[in-house]
Amino acid sequence: MREPSDTAVCGKGFYMCDFKSHCVIEFSEKGNFLSRIGYENVPNFPNGIDVSDVGDVLVGDSHGYDCVFKTRYFVIRIRVSLC
């Protein structure tokens, strides 16, 4: 990770925003890599993350981009909404 900016715990694992790598990484409870959400500039600069009660991963962007629902896709076993 280049610059971790926030963490959200979900079930037995956790998610970390990586501000400078423009992504969110999912880890197991032991810290093993499970998946990567995003790619260069999507999300742009993630600095906040939370997981809703139904398992949606919500990512905040620090550069003030308006949040518009774009897509929903499945990564391994989690549902992810991008804005």
Image (tube, rainbow, N blue to C red):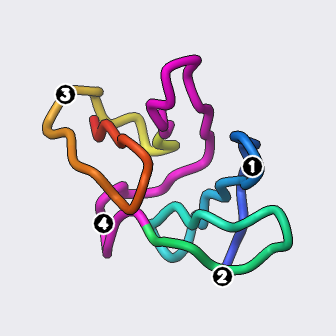
Could you tell me how far apart the alpha carbons at marks 1 and 2 are, in whole angstroms?
14 Å
Q: Which mark is residue 2?
A: 2
Give the residue at mark 4. Answer: 41
The secondary element bearing badge 1 is classed as strand
Tell me which segment is drawn in magenta. 37-60
Instruction: Give the foreground label among 3 and 2.
Output: 3
Q: Give the SS element for disc 3.
A: loop
Q: Are marks 4 and 3 in contact (CB under 8 Å)?
A: no
State which tag comes first along the sequence, 1 or 2.
2
Could you tell which of marks 1 and 4 lies nearer the N-terminus? Answer: 1
Which numbered marker is on residue 69? 3
Quadrant in which residue 1 is drawn: bottom right
Amino acid type, mark 3: Phe
Q: Which mark is residue 7?
A: 1
Residue under the point 28% across and 51% down: 74
In the image shown, does 15 or 47 lie closer to the viewer? 15
Q: Work out how far the residue at label 1 is from the one at label 4, CA to CA, in angstroms.
A: 19 Å
The residue at 29%/40% (across/down) is 82
Magenta stretch: residue 74 in it? no
Q: Amino acid at mark 2?
A: Arg
Horizontally, residue 8 falls left or right of residue 60, namely right
Along the line of sight, the residue nearer the viewer: 39 or 81:
81
**Local secondary structure at mark 4:** loop
First in sequence: mark 4 vs mark 2:
2
